[in-house]
Structures are given as structure tokens and as C-alpha cells.
Image: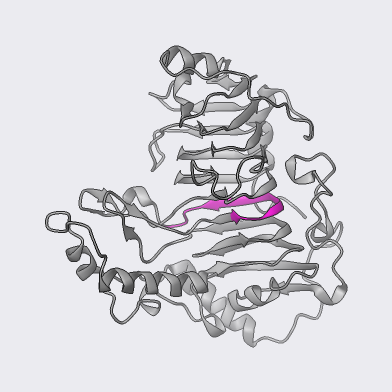
């Protein structure tokens, strides 16, 4: 299997190679005025403002402030747990090596791995399960080699902020076992998995645009997340199942806590936002996974916006759209999982033909979901009531056992379809 470099990657590689050879800029490339790199999360702006708040690298010494233009430079700049601010310029592709040279999937493939041989070995027509064997082990080594290169793993007390229209492509951000991290004003596109795994029933890709794992005090703000030039919906089918190349867009898992997700654009994706990745409490999820999701624009998404287990999740002033031109079919938006407490307020839905109010909510062993002030197709609709009427054998209670106390202004729902598209996403902060 071989993935040809995208034209954007090639162009980025040329720019990065040129910038690597150029002398340092004579002046600060950041626009004048307020320095968003030193901006902390506002008091009461969602769950990430609790227990001391989220400051990222706001207290960084001048020596720990840097501007990066290459993938290698970015990976180096975010290391360590000391306060630091990292400004990102331009489009940086994770599928680039030293000097910005473009990479392909083949550059990470283990010598024993072959896509066609892998597909043949696991053909359900003759595979009976049991030991995975050498090809599966070679696939795993290949996946791990790519993972090591294309995932950005910042340390604690870090702020990453885009300068103007900046983005990361062909990789993702993994916040693993860290505290106090801010990522703002940045595009993150096409977290492409070169080596998806056959799990006996479906294909599994592993990379998220952003994954928050075993971490706390995280603010994700004014980001634009997409699948780039790779739509899973248009990819090949093998064994009658679509070969996925992407996992989640913003997954918050393994006991992570105190996260605010604000003013982002998430566009064109399947499994979008998973909060809590298992029905068990193996990761100590109970009492954690407290997340605020506000003023985000969600367009053309299939499901999990969000899907929640255990967590107390405040979902307010978000705008959801899905139309016939989307590459991805619509399944649902709010997934109520085990012991979850979604508290939804003043959200707006502009959905295409065939999508009804009762489709917005799905229960995944959940028992409750609170919802008020929802607009659906320009009309105020009781979405929880519509769900319960359509599912009389598994109704959801409106008593989630908590009420949000930490939040900014909750706008009237009729303002949301105009306010959010005008202000959400990367490139809007200066």
C-alpha cells in the first residue's frame, strides 16, 4: 500500500525547505497588538476554568517563546513541562522529514508488511481468527513507526497558537498524561492512518485530530478540524466494509478531566467526539470527563457530537448543520452513554431532508439527558421529548443530577446560527 503525497504536502515541503535554509526573521512575525499566546482561559469559561484554571504557557520566560515553521521544529519546541509558548506559522505537514522533504506511507512500512498480503491473510472467507501472525505483527510495527512520527505530544504548561492562517496536516495532537495545555487558532487536518487494522468485523484507524488522554486543564479554542483531502466515505471497501483512515476529531478519554472546547469548526467526519472510551470504569472515568462544549460549528458530521460516558458535559450555543452535499451520512449528534450527564442548552440545528428532531439523541445505555432551548429547522423543539416519544421502551430522564455553574454568556438560540459561523474556527484570533 502506498499513499501518494498530496499536492499541498509537496508545496508545504518546498516552503519548509526554503524556510529551513533561510536566516532567522529580523522582526517578530506575529501581528502587533494583544498577544494571544499569553492569554489564559477566562474565569468561569467552562470546566477547564475549575480548580485553578488553565493558563498553558502564559507565564513562559522570553527564552521559552518560539515560532516554528517545520514539523521537526514543532515537535522539539513543545517538549518538556516548563511553561512555554509555541507560535505556528504556515501549513506544517507531519508527513515531512528533515528539511521538509515529503514522506509517504511506504517510508514507515515494516519490511515484512504488505497491504495486499495482509488483506489476503485476513479474508473472512478463510480466516478463522486465532493468532494474528507475522503480517499482523508487521502491520503493528508499521503503525507504531508512523505514530511516533506524526503525533505531536506536548508537555504540560504549553500554549500552541497559530499565527494567522496556520495549520497542521497529515498528523494529530496527542495530549497524554499532561496538565495545563492550550491549543488555539490552528487548523488540524487529515490525521491519516496508513496502516488500519482489520478487527474481524470492521476496519479500525487509530489517529485523532486531537486526543486528550489521562490529562486535565485543557482549552481547545478557535480550531478548524477536517479530514483534509481524504474523505473516509469515498474510500475503498474491503470485505464489504469501508477502510477507515481516521478515528476521532476531539476524543477525551482515559480519565481526562476539566476541558473546555470552544469556538471551533469541525467539518466532514464520522466518529467525531468520544468522551470516555469504555463502558467500564477501568480508567477512573467516574467523577471525571467534565467537559464544556460551546459556540462550535459542527457541519456534515455523522455521529458523536459528542458521545459521552460518565462525564458531566455542558453543551451550549453550538450550531449543527448537515445537508445533502455532505460526504457523510447523519446518524445522531448527542450520545448518552453509561452514567453520562449531558446538559444541553440553546443549541441550533439546521439539518437536511430526512433528518428529524428525534434523530438528534441516541442512548448508549444512558439513562438521562437534559435539554432546553433547542432550535430545529428554525423552530423551538423539545428534542428530548421527541426522542422519548420515538423510543417509548427506552426513555431518557431529564434529571442528570447536576447543573452547570461555570460558563460564559449563554446567547439566545436564535443568535447562534449567525454568531457561531461568523466567529468560530482558525484564523479568527489576532
Q: Would residue 319 appear left or right of 300 to someone viewing this image?
A: right
Q: Would residue 265 appear left or right of 324 to someone viewing this image?
A: right
Q: How many marks?
A: 0
- Taking depth in this image into account, of 365 and 149 the one nearest to the observer is 365
* 345 lies above or below 173: above
> Is 375 a magenta residue?
no
- Give the residue furthest to the left: 126
Q: Main secondary structure of the magenta part?
A: strand
Instruction: Give residue 396's position: percent from left, percent from top.
Output: 52, 20
Q: Quadrant of the C terminus?
A: bottom right
What residue is rendered at 38% in x and 43% in y?
327
> Is 222 a magenta residue?
yes
What residue is rendered at 52% in x and 58% in y?
189
* 48 lies above or below 73: above
Image quadrant in which you'd find residue 245: bottom left
Q: Quadrant of the N terminus?
A: bottom left
What residue is rendered at 26% in x and 53% in y?
200
* 243 lies above or below 263: below
- Taking depth in this image into account, of 385 and 417 the one nearest to the observer is 385
Instruction: Give residue 122's position: percent from left, percent from top.
Output: 21, 61
Instruction: Give residue 334's position: percent from left, percent from top.
Output: 52, 31
Q: Which residues are magenta?
A: 212-229
Amino acid at each position: 500500500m502506498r499513499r501518494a503525497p498530496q499536492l499541498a504536502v509537496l508545496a508545504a515541503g518546498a516552503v519548509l525547505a526554503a524556510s529551513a535554509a533561510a536566516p532567522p526573521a529580523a522582526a517578530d512575525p506575529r501581528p502587533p497588538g494583544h498577544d494571544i499566546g499569553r492569554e489564559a482561559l477566562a474565569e468561569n469559561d467552562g470546566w477547564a476554568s475549575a480548580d485553578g484554571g488553565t493558563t498553558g504557557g502564559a507565564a513562559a520566560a522570553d527564552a521559552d517563546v518560539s515560532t516554528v515553521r517545520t514539523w521537526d521544529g514543532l515537535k522539539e519546541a513543545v517538549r518538556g513541562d516548563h511553561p512555554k509558548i509555541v507560535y505556528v506559522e504556515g501549513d506544517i505537514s507531519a508527513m515531512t522529514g528533515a528539511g521538509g522533504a515529503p514522506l509517504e506511507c511506504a517510508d514507515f512500512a515494516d519490511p515484512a508488511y504488505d497491504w495486499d498480503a495482509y488483506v489476503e491473510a485476513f479474508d473472512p472467507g478463510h480466516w478463522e481468527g486465532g493468532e494474528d501472525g507475522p503480517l499482523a505483527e508487521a502491520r503493528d510495527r508499521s503503525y507504531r513507526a508512523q505514530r511516533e512520527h506524526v503525533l505531536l505530544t506536548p508537555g504540560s504548561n504549553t500554549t500552541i497558537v497559530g499565527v494567522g492562517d496556520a495549520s497542521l496536516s497529515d498528523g494529530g495532537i496527542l495530549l497524554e498524561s499532561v496538565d495545563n495545555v492550550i491549543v488555539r487558532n490552528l487548523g488540524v487536518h487529515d490525521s491519516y492512518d496508513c496502516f488500519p487494522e482489520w478487527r474481524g468485523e470492521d476496519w479500525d484507524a487509530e489517529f485523532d485530530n486531537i486526543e486528550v488522554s489521562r490529562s486535565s486543564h485543557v482549552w481547545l479554542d478557535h480550531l478548524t478540524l477536517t479530514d483534509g483531502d481524504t474523505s473516509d466515505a469515498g474510500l475503498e471497501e474491503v470485505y464489504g466494509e469501508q477502510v477507515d483512515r481516521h478515528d476521532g476529531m476531539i476524543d477525551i478519554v482515559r480519565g481526562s478531566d476539566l476541558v473546555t472546547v470552544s469556538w471551533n469548526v469541525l467539518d466532514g467526519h464520522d466518529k467525531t467526539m468520544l468522551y470516555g472510551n469504555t463502558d467500564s470504569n477501568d480508567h477512573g472515568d467516574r467523577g471525571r470527563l467534565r467537559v464544556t462544549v460551546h459556540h462550535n460549528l459542527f457541519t456534515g458530521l455523522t455521529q458523536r457530537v459528542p458521545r459521552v460516558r460518565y462525564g458531566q458535559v455542558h453543551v451550549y450555543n453550538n450550531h449543527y448543520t448537515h445537508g445533502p452535499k455532505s460526504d457523510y451520512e447523519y446518524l445522531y449528534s448527542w450520545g448518552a452513554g453509561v452514567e453520562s450527564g449531558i446538559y444541553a442548552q440553546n443549541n441550533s440545528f439546521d439539518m437536511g431532508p430526512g433528518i428529524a428532531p428525534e434523530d438528534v439523541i441516541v442512548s448508549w445505555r444512558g439513562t438521562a439527558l437534559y435539554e432546553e432551548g433547542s432550535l430545529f429547522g428554525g423552530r423551538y423543539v423539545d428534542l428530548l421529548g421527541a426522542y422519548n416519544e420515538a423510543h417509548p421502551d427506552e426513555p431518557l430522564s431529564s434529571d442528570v443530577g447536576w447543573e452547570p455553574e461555570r460558563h460564559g454568556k449563554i446567547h439566545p438560540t436564535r443568535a447562534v446560527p449567525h454568531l457561531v459561523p461568523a466567529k468560530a474556527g482558525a484564523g479568527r484570533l489576532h
